[in-house]
Structures are given as C-alpha cells and as structure tokens.
Image (spheres, grey):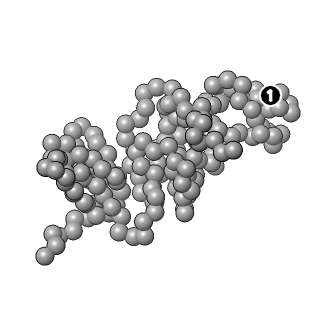
Amino acid sequence: MAPPVRYCIPGERLCNLEEGSPGSGTYTRHGYIFSSLAGCLMKSSENGALPVVSVMRETESQLLPDVGAIVTCKVSSINSRFAKVHILYVGSTPLKNSFRGTIRKEDVRATEKDKISLGDAQSNYLLTTAENELGVVVAHSESGVQMVPISWCEMQCPKTHTKEFRKVARVQPEFLQT
C-alpha cells in the first residue's frame, strides 16, 4: 500500500534542516524547510543521505519560477516604489502562462540579494536585480527608440541623446542569440 499523500500550501513549514535538504518547490528560513507552492510533499533519499524534500504540483506540469531562478520579464507598470512585471521566461525557457512579479525600488541594487520568495501561479513573485548580471536588457525611450547602454547605470536614446538611469544587466555570452 502506498504511503498517504500529504498536500501542502505556500508558506507551510515542512520540516527542519536536520531532517532533510530543500528541493524544488521549497525554500529555507530560520533552520526550517517551507513550501513555496501548493502541491504534494515528496521525500527522496539516496545512499543514506538526508532526504530531499520537494513539493510537486499535481496538475499538468509547467515550469515555475523558483527561488534563485534567472527570469526575463516585461515591465507592465512603474511607480515611485516598485515596478510590476510579467515573467515571460525562466532561464531560456518560455512560459506557457506569464506570472506576475514585483521589483521593489530597494531591490534594485548590486548586493544583499534577497534570501526568500514565495510563489504559485496565482501569486506575485518578489524579484531582485541584486547581481551584476541582472537588470534592464532592453528599454525604449519616450520617442519609442530602443535605448543603448552607456554604463552599468545609464542608457541613452540614439535619436534624442537623452540619458536615463537604469540598472543595466551584464548579459552573459551564453545567453546572447546570434
């Protein structure tokens, strides 16, 4: 007889770090493993090591943004405190459905990367540009022309020569398409 299936929800504490190591669909905080999405709890162990604790969705599997994943987004709105975005890619894989995300003003920085992010298909992902490689890849000026990066923190419109402050991404060569 198969063991009973345990369902969990985002933010639910699953076990402490002494009982297992975090897998997909989980995150750690204060010495515990928590679920980052709704689904079934899975534990797998190899060679007597600590079991890997994961949360798997039951429905048709779709790639989900996970803690630490590099995502490509399109900004949908901006105000003085944050930018709302639609997550279109996880790594180089396009998503079937876009997810909502938020980039707070205080998370646009080069250090102190956020440690935690919760999410499921219906929730809002908290994103950061806290690494040198992360930031704006493509921007358009008010005149509708694609801007050109001129430093790590500025982009310029080639038509009007207007400069705008942006945290510019340093795109790695393996992600450039030829």
Q: Residue 116, position in %: x, y?
A: 37, 41
Q: Does residue 38 appear in the picture of this structure?
A: yes
Q: Position of residue 37 (x, y in %)?
A: 36, 56
Looking at the image, which residue is at 80% across and 32% down? 157
How many marks do you count on the picture? Answer: 1
Quarter residue 163 falls in: top right
Q: Residue at x 43, y 70 (%)?
A: 60
Amino acid identity at mark 1: Thr
Is the residue 74 above or below the residue 63 in the image?
above
Q: Quadrant of residue 40?
A: bottom left
**Nearer to the camera, 115 or 131:** 131
Q: Quadrant of residue 108?
A: top right
Q: Secondary structure at mark 1?
A: loop
Residue 32: percent from left, percent from top: 22, 43
Q: Residues within 10 Å of mark 1 (few under 14, many from 20)?
A: few
Give the position of the N terminus as an image quadrant: bottom left
Which residue is most to the bottom? 1
**Above or below: residue 31 compared with residue 24:** above
Q: Residue at x 34, y 53 (%)?
A: 25
The residue positioned 30% from the left and 58% from the top of the image is: 55
Find the residue positioned furthest to the right. Answer: 159
* Left or right: 117, with 166 as reference point: left
Question: Considering only vertical position in the picture, is 59 above or below 27?
Answer: below
Q: Quadrant of the C terminus?
A: top right
Tag 1 residue: 162
Residue 164 can be seen, yes or no:
no
- The spot of residue 148 in percent (x, y) is 75, 32
